[in-house]
Image: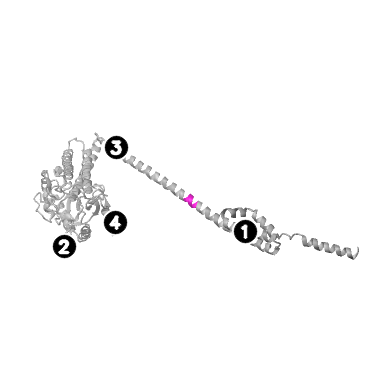
Amino acid sequence: MSARRLAAVAVAGVVLAACAPIPRPAVLDELDHVRAGAAAAESKRYAPGAFARAEKLRSDALAALDQKDRAGAQILGEQAVAAHAHAHAISRVARAEAAEAEAKAQRSAGEASLAGLEAEQARVAAEVDALDMRIKVARDAQPVVPSGKADADREKARLAAARSLALQARLLCGAARLLTASPPGDPQPDGAQSSAAPSDGAQAGSTQPSAALSAGAQARGAQPGAAQPNTAQAGAAQAGAAQPSAAQPSAAQPNTAQPGAAQPGGAQPGSASLAAQLDEATAAIKKLDADLAEAGVAGRAIPAPIDQASRARAGCLAALTAARRAATPVTRAPGAGDALLAELSAAGTWSPVRDDRGIVVTLRGLFAGNALTKAGEARLRDLSRVAAAHPAFPVAVVVHTDREISAREEPAWAARADAVVRALDPAQGASAAAAPQAPRIAPFLAGSAAPVVDPGGSERGRNARVEIVFVTPETL
């Protein structure tokens, strides 16, 4: 080939090479692969702004390629790939936030559903409780089935149980009278006499309970006047002449230091309905005493009045409950009894318990003969400080014996009860101004009707005890 022809071919090759298109940068192919992937679709859904920016850089890269700017297309393509990666990262954050929001929404829906279920459960539980109460009321409304006849041993046991129930009834009614007693000098409606008034020979305003209690013991069998609904006495008609163990509360209040001031929300002593209820309960005890005396006569096969004793106790408990309800303010939650029980328990020396009357502290070994021991006086002084700190609680001093006592022995036991009352009275040895809110204190002789151990066993001495009862003035 001639040199001329070779030169022509070379020139033609140069011309053809100059007219050939610029090769596409590899980064644009990578960019197309990224755009077609699932990550780009997710970015377009959750991060549309970042995805649009990446697409704008891709368009700029393609435009640079069209303008034969291969270097610019390469740079813009790489920026577009990075923008897609950034958009994917933003989309993952957005997707996580969306999942969190959905989870929170599901949680809120679940909590709302749970709250609805709990409300429904509470409603159903309330309906169940209401039905249980209706069943209980309906069951309690059924008449008491008479006990019926029994053999001699069972009748003997019933008689002992009836005497114990009669004692409980007297103590409950006595507690109710302590709660409804008026301060001295208060007017009494319907001719009622205040429980602080003198009775059975007791001196008005006397702080010595021995006169009242001993007079009550000596006048057993006498019928007190019905016009004294608030006189704190046990059983009034003392068929107890045949029952020396009957509770004998003081007919006069041994403590006259303004008891009403200690109960700002106390029961109204002039409540006619409450006085009538208490009188009715007392009358039931009178009838029960007579029936117990008749059933206790040797050689007479008379059924023990066990059902009557149960009704008498229930009547006195109802009267005590009514007195507490009248004394409980509706503007605050009760809890004085719980506070006193906690205080006595925290002391660690009293072992208090709660019963229908209130908070009970049981003491033993207080006496040497008929006189208090020094240790007994010290313990009673400690309890006296508790009573002074809680003047709203009337105090009942209940003396139990470990054997049946005769009428001749009752004055000695009454003297023991008097000694306990004097030791407990925070006003003893102080002026009235020094103890303006001293609680009311009344003694009761319970006898042997409420033993705590076998009266014929080796530990029968534990039945001789003194109960200091802080009568709870309000409902639970």
Residue 318 falls left or right of residue 30: left
The residue located at (65%, 60%) in the rendering is 60
In the image shown, does 29 or 361 lie closer to the viewer?
A: 29
The residue where tag 2 is placed is: 434
Residue 94 in the image, given as x and y percentages of width and height: 54, 56
Eyeballing the image, is 334 above or below 290? Answer: below
Looking at the rendered structure, the secondary structure element under dot 2 is loop
**For the point 86% across and 65% down, which residue is it?**
7
Mark 1 vs 3, N-terminal side: 1
Rounded to the nearest whole Å, what is the CA distance between mark 4 and mark 1? 80 Å
Towards the viewer: 105 or 70: 70
Q: Is residue 105 magenta?
A: yes
Give the extent of the magenta segment. 103-107
User: Majority secondary structure of the magenta segment?
Assistant: helix
Q: Give the number of the disc on residue 342.
A: 4
Q: Are marks 2 and 1 in contact (CB under 8 Å)?
A: no
Q: Which residue is mark 1?
A: 56
Q: Is residue 28 above or below residue 444?
A: below
